[in-house]
């Protein structure tokens, strides 16, 4: 599966998507238009090792809800993400069960390298 969770209103998401230039095989899910479902979030949690790994601690809502002052359980984090789409880190790229979460340089660099490798394998297998 190839999927991108993002916000169309987020300039960082738009910049990263433009930089990575995913092909038409990717499914794009704008989290504002179509919030992540419980099934999708549970799948991400399994791929990443927990809900905390996709929890956006930089979001304005995180501070507004005073979540920074609390010790949250995985179940609470899950509930917050499902109730407030901005609490999901973004963008999230899923490329054949490899997951790249967030917008750090390290993550984007690893994603770009992975995409190059995936694309070169497709080209090599076609020759």
Image (tube, grey):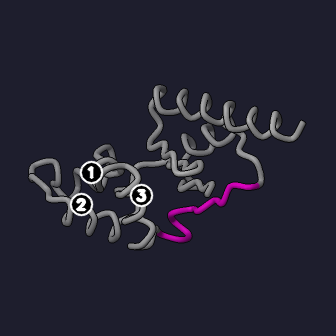
Instruction: Residue at 15% x, 54% y: name it.
Output: 66
The mark closer to the camera, 1 or 3, is: 3
Q: Is residue 123 above or below residue 30?
A: above
Left or right: 108 in relation to 69: right
Tag 1–tag 2 contact (CB < 8 Å): yes
First in sequence: mark 1 vs mark 3: 3
Q: Is residue 29 above or below residue 109?
A: below
Q: Is residue 90 magenta?
A: no
Return the residue found at the far right: 127
Q: Which residue is mark 3?
A: 44
Residue 84: name its quadrant: bottom left
Which span of residues is magenta-colored?
Answer: 25-35
The mark closer to the camera, 3 or 2, is: 3
Left or right: 32 in relation to 54: right
* Residue 2, horizontal then vertical, whole percent: 63, 54
Instruction: Residue at 17% x, 54% y: name it.
Output: 67
* Residue 21, horizontal then vertical, whole percent: 72, 40
Most foreground residue, 98 or 125: 125
| Mark 3 vs mark 2, CA separation in Å | 13 Å
Q: Quadrant of the C terminus?
A: top right
* Residue 22, horizontal then vertical, whole percent: 71, 45
Left or right: 73 in relation to 127: left
Left or right: 71 in relation to 58: left
* Residue 16, horizontal then vertical, whole percent: 60, 38
Q: Which residue is mark 1?
A: 52
Question: Quick one: SS at disc 1?
Answer: helix
Instruction: Residue at 81% x, 33% y: name it.
Output: 124
Instruction: Residue at 61% x, 31% y: name it.
Output: 112
Q: Which residue is mark 2?
A: 77
Magenta span main SS: loop
Q: Is residue 120 above or below residue 28?
A: above
């Amino acid at each position: 599966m190839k999927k991108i969770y993002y916000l169309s209103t987020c300039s960082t998401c738009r910049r990263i998507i433009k930089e990575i230039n995913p092909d038409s095989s990717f499914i794009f899910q704008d989290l504002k238009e179509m919030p992540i479902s419980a099934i999708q979030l549970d799948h991400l949690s399994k791929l990443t090792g927990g809900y905390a790994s996709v929890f956006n601690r930089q979001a304005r809502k995180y501070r507004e809800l005073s979540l920074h002052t609390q010790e949250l359980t995985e179940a609470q984090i899950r509930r917050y993400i499902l109730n407030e789409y901005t609490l999901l880190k973004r963008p999230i790229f899923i490329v054949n069960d490899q997951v790249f979460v967030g917008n750090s340089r390290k993550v984007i660099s690893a994603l770009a390298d992975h995409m190059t490798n995936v694309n070169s394998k497709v080209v090599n297998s076609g020759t």
